[in-house]
Image (cartoon, grey):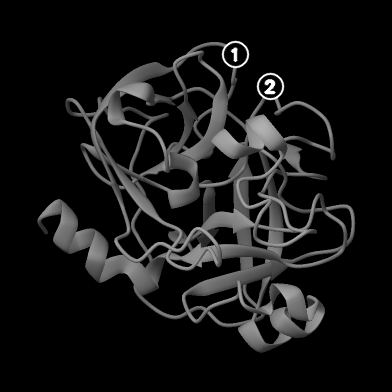
């Protein structure tokens, strides 16, 4: 899903013995143009490592753990295709901007901006999504999409997958996890759960969690895979001011 996942199974293997980054298990195949904001983040070998989300003419969001250790020329985004192995347009990056307070151990502030080298060509299958600007608590229906593995130990999905989940408040999220993982659920986190057998998996990190048509979260970490515990996302509204100041809005 992201660089460390490709190498050792999870970018945060050092965080906790039982955590791993996201991928979608138990989802449905997306239709053409259904998630026009969702992009595939690739390395120089054209491996899909994470999701990325279009928020402007030259800007995408992803998880910071996806970009740590990379220089801008080593990554690119493929936009406009629901197939991981074909189609879409490729965009190189002019710069990567990780959140200045990103913590690789606790995954706090797990968010990064990607600036494309030139303007993204918009179409019916390539469109930005608005960022959330309010605090989403528990009980809301959300949608997550991504090319992550469809079961633990498998390869990333060829076709874009999605599923509906329900948000949890942070207190309930912590109670469902063990004490070892409480330190990785922050005020700037948002959690979701549906049922055992459904959840994110390798390759979904940095992908979009959408609530009421706006970008509410970015896949950050979870227990591999769809093991019946909440998935944890970076809450976009908590970082909206940083994003807007960084891109000059």
Residue 93, how many percent across, how many down? 27, 28
Residue 142, located in which quarter of the rendered image? bottom right
Per the rendering, the mark at residue 85 is 1
User: Dot 2, how many residues are within 10 Å of its Cα: few (below 14), some (14-19), or many (20+)?
Assistant: some
Marks 1,2: beta carbons within 8 A: yes
- Label 1 packing within 10 angstroms: few (<14), some (14-19), many (20+): few
Q: Quadrant of the C terminus?
A: bottom left
Could one spot residue 129 in this view of the protein?
Answer: yes
Residue drawn at the location 67% of the way across and 88% of the way down: 171
The answer, for residue 63, to whether it is visible in the render is: no
Choose between 239 and 126: the one closer to the eye.
239
Residue highlighted by disc 2: 158
Q: Which residue is at the far front?
A: 14
Q: Residue 243, position in %: x, y? A: 25, 60
| Labels 1 and 2: the sequence-earlier one | 1
- Residue 128 pos. (x, y %): 33, 44
């Amino acid at each position: 899903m992201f660089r460390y996942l490709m190498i050792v199974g999870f970018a945060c293997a050092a965080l906790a013995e039982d955590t791993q980054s996201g991928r979608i298990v138990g989802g449905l195949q997306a239709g053409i143009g259904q998630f026009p904001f969702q992009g595939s983040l690739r390395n120089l070998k054209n491996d899909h490592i994470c999701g990325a989300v279009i928020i402007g003419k030259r800007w995408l969001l992803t998880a910071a753990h996806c970009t740590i250790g990379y220089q801008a020329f080593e990554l690119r985004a493929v936009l406009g295709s629901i197939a991981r192995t074909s189609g879409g347009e490729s965009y190189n990056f002019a710069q990567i901007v990780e959140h200045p307070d990103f913590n690789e151990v606790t995954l706090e502030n797990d968010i990064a901006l990607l600036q494309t080298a030139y303007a993204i060509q918009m179409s019916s299958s390539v469109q930005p999504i608005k960022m959330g600007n309010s605090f989403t608590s528990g009980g809301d229906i959300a949608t997550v999409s991504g090319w992550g593995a469809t079961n633990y130990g498998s390869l990333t999905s060829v076709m874009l997958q999605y599923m509906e989940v329900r948000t949890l408040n942070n207190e309930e999220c912590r109670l469902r996890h063990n004490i070892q993982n409480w330190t990785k659920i922050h005020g700037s986190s948002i959690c979701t759960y549906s049922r055992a057998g459904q959840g994110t998996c390798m390759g979904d990190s940095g992908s979009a969690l959408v609530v009421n048509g706006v970008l509410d979260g970015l896949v950050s970490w979870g227990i591999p895979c769809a093991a019946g515990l909440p998935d944890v996302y970076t809450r976009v509204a908590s970082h909206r001011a940083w994003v807007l100041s960084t891109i000059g809005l």
